[in-house]
Image (cartoon, grey):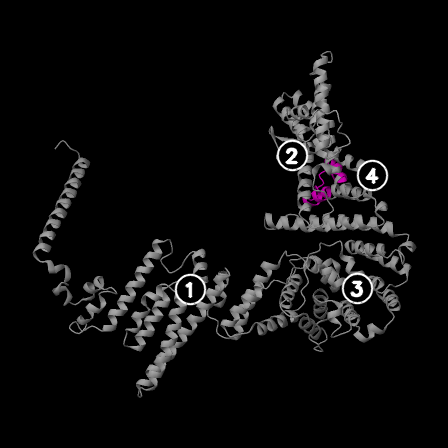
Amino acid sequence: EEQGPQEREKEKEKDAFLVRDLAKDADRVAYEQLVAEYPLALKRLPFHSLVGPAPWSMLLPELTIESVDSLLPLAAPLSLNKDDFYINLIHTILKSHKSLSSAAGNDSDNTVDPQMAYELAISKTPTQFNAVQQLIYNLKDPESMIMATKHIADQVPCGPDRIAALKMAGSLMSKWRQYIKRMSEPERSRVATRAKAMAGLISECLTDTNIEIALRQRRLERHLALFLNVQDSESVIRALAAVFEDECDRRLTGGTASASVSSGAGSSTSAATDNLYSALPQQQDVDPTTHHIHETLRNLAAIFEITLDTLMRELLNKYLMAPVTLSEHSVDLQLPSARYRADLRHPDSQESVLRRRITCILSNQPPSEAVRALLVFAYNPNIQISCLGRARALNILFSVATDEEIATLQVPQDVHSLFQVMLYLDDFNHVGIPQTRVEFAACQKDALARSIWVEHHEDPKVVQLICNMCLDFHVDDCDLIVQVIRRLLVAGMYRYVVGVLDVLGGMEEEYSGDIEELPEFWNQAVAGFMLQITTKLGSCDGDGDGDSSQVSANRVWIESALGVLDSCLRSIYLPDIDATQTISALLKPRRTKKRLSSASSLAPESSSASASAEQLACAVFDILLYSHAAEDVLLDHLDSLEPQDIHQLIIRYLDFIDCASTLPNSPLFVDWAASRTLTLVFDMIDDMALHEQVLMNHHKPLGKAVKAFVSNRIARDKLQITVTACLDKGKDVLAVMLVGRYYETRPVHVLLEDIKRSGFIPVEDTAAAAVADAVVADAVVASAIDAGDMDVVGSDAEGGESLETHKL
């Protein structure tokens, strides 16, 4: 009575446990007494349960491979089908295998982890099916045998067991059909209909299993969905094409080039205009010699009784006939031929992707067959094939075959001429000046260029076409070329003009000496292009859908800008290219608007445009030739900035450098210490003692800027001002760290000499001074030994003492 409700409930539970334990003990005693009195109970089935309405509840627990023959006599008195004994036994064995598989960590719905699926796919020997195969032959009904085998195939994982089960089902199906033929009507028709449906289902399952195994063997199970419910050969071809495209794009992107795009196109007679786009980023063709993709497709196609050659012909024709789709990023190049060449330099463009796929297909063919296929397409009289489509085939031909291989079927010079003509015909059609292949090949190109200039000199697209003709066909008219370039500059086609000037620099004997305006054109084109970038970025400020799109956009304009600057470095007119003019043009709008906005309510310039202008100005100062005037312009701009703006400039330019360092053949440095711009900015920070305002935020160092600052100061041997500033602010620990970092980058003797000069060793202490002199001398010798300069090492050096002192 004194216990509460909870205590009483616990006592009741204890009593219940005790009662159950006693019952178990009593049952155990009773069971042992029963077995002792009736020992045959261990070997007999319970009669009343067995003859009841559910005999299988008693039979299934006793059903094993060893006991099945002993239980079969019960079939007649219990009115059971003997086949049911074997079918239930098969089901029991499969269930036990499935339980073991689940206990091993696999899912309960027949799925396995990728590694287990791969091991099953590459396995050759069935295991589970062998345990039940003999039981199937004990069945008397042919249809039951087939259904049981199909059931086994559905239960086992995809691998050799399922293949063995389905093949056995197919073999049993053939025997059943022979049995059906001996039946009489109408039973024969009814059974034949069921047999036909079952045969189709088994065949479909076998095909799906072979496909799944073939894909899993190569870890390509992601493509399984493509082959579900394929109905005809066209759907099969589409599925195989999707596998090819995905694997080709995955495996071949970023491979090592065996023949670059430019080398393939450059072998044509359009070599001059091919170089117009050297300011553009250039991709490398992939290595097309891998046979992995072809072997995978061969195995998959064989399952559907399609040969690899048939599949490759279908895909090659599909890709060659695909319309030429030009990217939006090349729209400012106006002409289709120019945009096509520019697209080939972007690995993600649709034309580059298509080119890789065609090259991969041809890599599995003998060179003569590849040459024949491409030439047949290029010379096909079908008017539905576009000029750029034919040029695409010939461009690929030049990259996969040599002139000697082409000569076996066609005169190489004729093929190169056809490629050039196809590009020009497409351009003429684009600008609305119709030309035929025969007319264009027969005309005088200089006369044609002059006549078109007279009639169409106001149209930038036509002017670009005239410029291409002047370069490709060496039109000897410097006045015309000067007028063409001026018109292109007025039209704002700066990137294209940089390419033209780059080509003219390589044709010095023909043009450069006679065109005095080339240095002026270089400066206008470079400055104009840089300003054009900032204008475009300002017009799309705020667009984009996330960080990834912003990074991709930044990479595009940085890549384009560096391509133009790289052209400047290659030019013979590099000394005449004025960095001051470009930097002033980039920074002048920012400085002007800053002054105006301080006195009025004028809206500030777009953040994207102003930031990119600063980054480009810094890059121009670093990459082009140094000049005091350019440094003065940049310093004037830095003086107009607040400390937080200087910090933002440093961070943005470091991001610019990081992006540039990931680009192929970037003309920009990677080492922060090599940057003239950063050195200029950091010198100003030292001179104006802006360390805390620029490099710290809420008394915390801003990692990237600080790291660049310290690296630059150490490399330039300008760390003293920073260390002094730290000591003045009471930041002794930071000063010690900076000094330690400095001497880590210097030889040992530099530290020892500085110690001696600093006065830590008094001059009057002659013994200590002598030791210091010896230490310095030994350090110099050790450094010389490390550098391999044996001339410095004197014969008086005492080896043992020198080594010990150096270690100390």
What type is the residue that disc 4 sits on?
Ser
Identify which amino acid the numbered label 2 is placed on: Lys
Provide residue 352's location: percent of width, then percent of height.
66, 61
Q: Secondary structure at mark 3?
A: loop
Residue 679's quadrant in the figure?
Answer: top right
The reply to whether dot 3 and dot 4 touch (C-beta < 8 Å) is no
Work out whether residue 364 or residue 183 is closer to the camera in this orientation and state it. Answer: 364
Residue at (75, 27) in percent of width and height: 795
Q: Check if mark 2's residue and mark 1's residue have beta carbons within 8 Å.
A: no
* Residue with the mark numbered 4: 627
> For the stretch drawn in magenta, what is the main secondary structure?
helix
Q: Residue at x 83, y 36 (%)?
A: 628
Give the x, y percent position of residue 609: 70, 45
Q: Nearer the viewer, mark 4 or mark 2?
A: 2
From mark 3 to mark 2, how far is it between C-alphas? 48 Å
Q: Residue furthest left?
A: 37
> Of the residues under marks 4 and 2, which one precedes in the sequence?
4
Q: Which one is closest to the eye, mark 1 or mark 4?
A: 1
Circle nearer the N terminus (1, 3):
1
